[in-house]
Amino acid sequence: MPDTPSASGLLTGYLDECRALVVEEIRRLVPADRPHAAFLYELMLEYPLREAKGLRPALCIATCRALGGTLEAALRPAAALELYHNAFLIHDDIEDESHLRRGRPTLHHLHGVPVAINVGDAMLALSLQPLLDNIGFIGLGPSLRILQVVAHMARESSEGQALELEWIRRGVWALEDEDYVRMVEQKTCWYSFITPVKVGAIAARQDERRTGMLAEFARCLGIAFQIQDDVLNLSGDVGAYGKEIGGDLWEGKRTLMLLHMMRHATSEERAEAGRILSLPRPGVHPSAQGSALEPLLEQLVTEGELLPGGRERLLRVLAASHPPREEKTPEQVRFLLGLIQRHGSLDYARQKAREWLRRAEESLTACEGWLLPSEHRTLLHTLLSYVLQRVK
């Protein structure tokens, strides 16, 4: 679909309006008068208040409204999904050892891993409240169906994350496009696209058939979106992208273009690329014998419990048993990027994204007969052109 100024304006305005409504709802949910509010509840607003697209709330609200539902029916589930999303981001950033999120340092870099994990856990717990609150607006039956969909989403997302982490842990690279798509569908599509659309349809009291047809549109759109997001990670501008450029290479993530490159590289290139990708990024695994033990050994010497010579011998043994690990270097990451460019892997990924977008458009067209003509239906179509523009 061609992009037009009016379509871009509609998308930006719609996303901004939905995000503002959902952020206000999240502010209402986050307690301000509880003990330790600054150490927990204020930090729960850290990611939601950072500049973001607000895609998930917009998908939920637009689907509900395009099916004749009300804003009130969709707003609370949209807020719950946004809480889930930001909680997942906090945990993902820790698991991926990421440095940036939405153009600023990640929460665990600002406040430490234990605090960040606790904030993410609290956001997941709080996300149940708006789903329960919605019983008074849409009734018990639809509310229970939404809870079932959200529970399924949480399981799919966790399984997808576990699959990717297992590939990284075991150094698995013999993967096909189908493996990547399966991982993305579980890890990303369910909570970012499929669930917002299904929840919006249920809030509008749609049947299983129509809800399933819209879910297929969301699945295809989500796969296209994730492919282009991976492309932007290697070719985008940090100001527009909001995350660390090249972070996927530093982290060794299995992206479509990296898998394509590994399939088409020479055996020597593949061996070197695999070796580099297995290395940790700098600063992730500090040496075990350093700052934590040296003060204790010094104290034991001062108290006469350990001779200075014994202290030096212990430090030498610790250093020998925990040698510094080799870490990735910028030159090695540039080598990986050069291989990806040399084997046409970025262009390959962009083409695959376009193919998934065509499938998404076909799925949405099949729903045209019962989607109400409105800005909400137009928004769903505009998302296709939005993703297309990002993969050009």
Image (cartoon, rainbow, N blue to C red):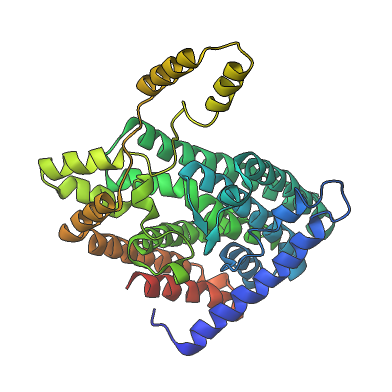
In the rendered image, the residue lying farthest to the bottom is: 5
For the point 81% across and 61% down, the residue is: 28
The percent position of residue 268, horizontal first and vertical second, equals: 11, 41
Q: Which residue is at the front of the view, 160 or 252?
A: 252
Q: Classify residue 163 as left or right of residue 379.
A: left
Q: Which residue is at the front of the view, 203 or 24?
A: 24
Q: Which residue is at the front of the view, 388 or 312?
A: 312
Q: In this view, does 164 lie above or below 344?
A: above
Q: Classify residue 58 as left or right of residue 256.
A: right
Residue 364 can be seen in this image: yes
Q: Which residue is at the front of the view, 215 or 264?
A: 264
Q: Is residue 270 above or below residue 8?
A: above
For the point 50% across and 41% down, the residue is: 95
For the point 50% across and 84% down, the residue is: 7
The percent position of residue 69, horizontal first and vertical second, equals: 71, 68
Q: In this view, does 280 lie above or below 201?
A: above
In the rendered image, the residue lying farthest to the right is: 33
For the point 38% across and 44% down, the residue is: 281
Residue 372 can be seen in this image: no
Q: How many marks?
A: 0
The percent position of residue 347, horizontal first and vertical second, equals: 24, 64
Q: Classify residue 47 as left or right of residue 179.
A: right
Quadrant assignment for the N terminus: bottom left
Q: Is residue 319 above or below residue 127?
A: above
Q: Quadrant of residue 224?
A: bottom left
The percent position of residue 63, horizontal first and vertical second, equals: 61, 67
Quadrant assignment for the C terminus: bottom left
